[in-house]
Image (cartoon, rainbow, N blue to C red):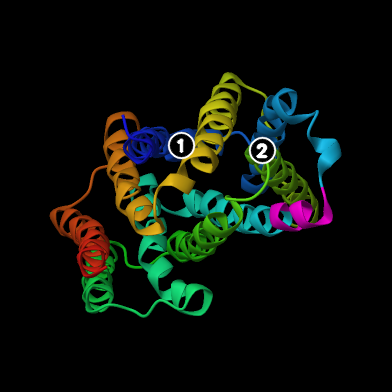
């Protein structure tokens, strides 16, 4: 099997696991404040990764640490916004709005790579905005605070994709991933100490949520992403990641009984279709 085809299948598997993280996070937030919960998740993930990379940690240079710091800041802000959004909105809506990052990536490529926008990017943006309008009609509850936080998460993830494509090709992947995990945990605990005061309930719900999110959603997914996204262009990665909100919506229906109205289904379809059309159009052009 060609390396790029294998990478595409691995990233598709990653989207399946990530789709379920919205449900696991939603459940876990019943037992812990969102930012502190995020710190626990990535602290455990960093400890899981430590046996793989501890010998290489001595070789960390200022340049490697700088890359890890940039990616760690972007990962922290993306996940912090996402966790907080799930306190106020449904798992399905959070996943779909967060996926807006895929349409932001082409716009960020202008200053970072010099690539101009294609006509497909503009058409895709119009379609996605229409989808977001349907998702947030006043009759469906309108835009809530969680939706705004999810959009903040989308912006952070878009920058993360751009910088991961740039930095992921240099140095040790496990070390770079460990730095992201560790720094995200540190930032989370610091921010939680400043803004949060909610109780931590040590129950089975918290344990299984942290296990899934730390092992599958963080350790496995982000390690695979760092290993294999280098073999896939940012455009291809965006198209594959379109399946994440699809899986999230399906899992939310099955496990959380969160169902969309007809207008929300239409909006969800437009969001995903707009992003895919944008990148497929550009792919043909390239």
Q: Which residue corresponds to mark 2?
A: 42
Give the dominant element type of the magenta stretch: helix, strand or loop.
helix
Q: Quadrant of the N terminus?
A: top left
> In which image quadrant can residue 231 be found?
top left
The residue identified by callout 1 is 21
Residue at figure coordinates x 39%, y 45% from the top left = 91
Q: Position of residue 9 (x, y in %)?
A: 33, 34
Tell how many labels. Answer: 2
Look at the picture and state if 255 lies above or below 137: above
Q: Residues within 10 Å of mark 2 (few under 14, many from 20)?
A: many
Q: Is residue 195 above or below residue 103?
A: above
Q: Residue at x 30, y 53 (%)?
A: 239
Q: Does residue 69 appear left or right of residue 12 in this picture?
A: right
Q: Furthest residue to the front?
A: 2
Label at residue 285: none
The percent position of residue 285, horizontal first and vertical second, equals 22, 70
In the image, residue 155 sits, relative to residue 256, either above or below, namely: below
Question: Does 15 appear in magenta?
Answer: no
Which residue appears farthest toward the top when viewing the image?
204
Residue at 64%, 53% in the rendered image: 76
The residue lying toward the viewer, choosing from 248 and 200, is: 248
The secondary element bearing badge 1 is classed as helix
In which quadrant is the C terminus drawn?
bottom left
Q: Which residues are magenta?
A: 61-68
| 71 or 77: nearer the viewer | 71
In the image, residue 156 sits, relative to residue 30, either above or below, namely below
| Residue in the picture at 69% in, 48% down | 184
Percent across and percent down for residue 29 are 56, 39
In-front residue for pair 81/260: 81
Question: What is the crowding at mark 1: few (fewer than 14 residues within 10 Å), some, or many (at least 20)?
Answer: many
- Specify which label sits upstream in the sequence, 1 or 2: 1
Specify whether 126 is left or right of 152. Answer: left
């Amino acid at each position: 099997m060609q390396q790029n085809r294998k990478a595409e299948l691995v990233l598709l598997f990653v989207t399946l696991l990530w789709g379920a993280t919205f449900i696991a996070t939603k459940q876990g937030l019943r037992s812990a404040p969102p930012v502190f919960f995020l710190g626990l998740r990535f602290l455990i993930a960093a400890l899981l990764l430590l046996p793989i990379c501890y010998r290489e940690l001595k070789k960390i240079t200022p340049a490697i640490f700088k890359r890890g710091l940039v990616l760690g800041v972007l990962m922290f802000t993306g996940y912090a916004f996402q966790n907080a959004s799930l306190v106020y909105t449904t798992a399905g809506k959070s996943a779909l709005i967060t996926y807006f990052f895929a349409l932001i990536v082409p716009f960020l490529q202008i200053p970072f790579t010099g690539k101009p926008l294609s006509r497909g990017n503009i058409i895709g943006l119009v379609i996605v905005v229409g989808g977001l309008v349907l998702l947030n009609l006043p009759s469906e509850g309108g835009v809530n605070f969680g939706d705004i936080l999810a959009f903040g998460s989308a912006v952070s993830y878009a920058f993360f994709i751009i910088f991961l494509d740039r930095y992921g090709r240099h140095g040790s992947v496990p070390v770079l991933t460990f730095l992201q995990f560790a720094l995200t945990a540190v930032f989370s605990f610091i921010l939680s100490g400043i803004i949060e005061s909610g109780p931590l309930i040590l129950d089975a719900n918290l344990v299984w949520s942290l296990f899934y999110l730390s092992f599958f959603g963080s350790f496995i997914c982000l390690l695979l992403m760092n290993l294999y996204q280098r073999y896939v262009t940012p455009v291809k990665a965006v198209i594959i990641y379109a399946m994440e909100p699809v899986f999230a919506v399906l899992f939310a229906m099955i496990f959380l009984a969160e169902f969309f109205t007809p207008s929300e289904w239409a909006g969800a379809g437009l969001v995903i279709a707009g992003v895919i059309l944008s990148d497929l159009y550009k792919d043909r052009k390239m």
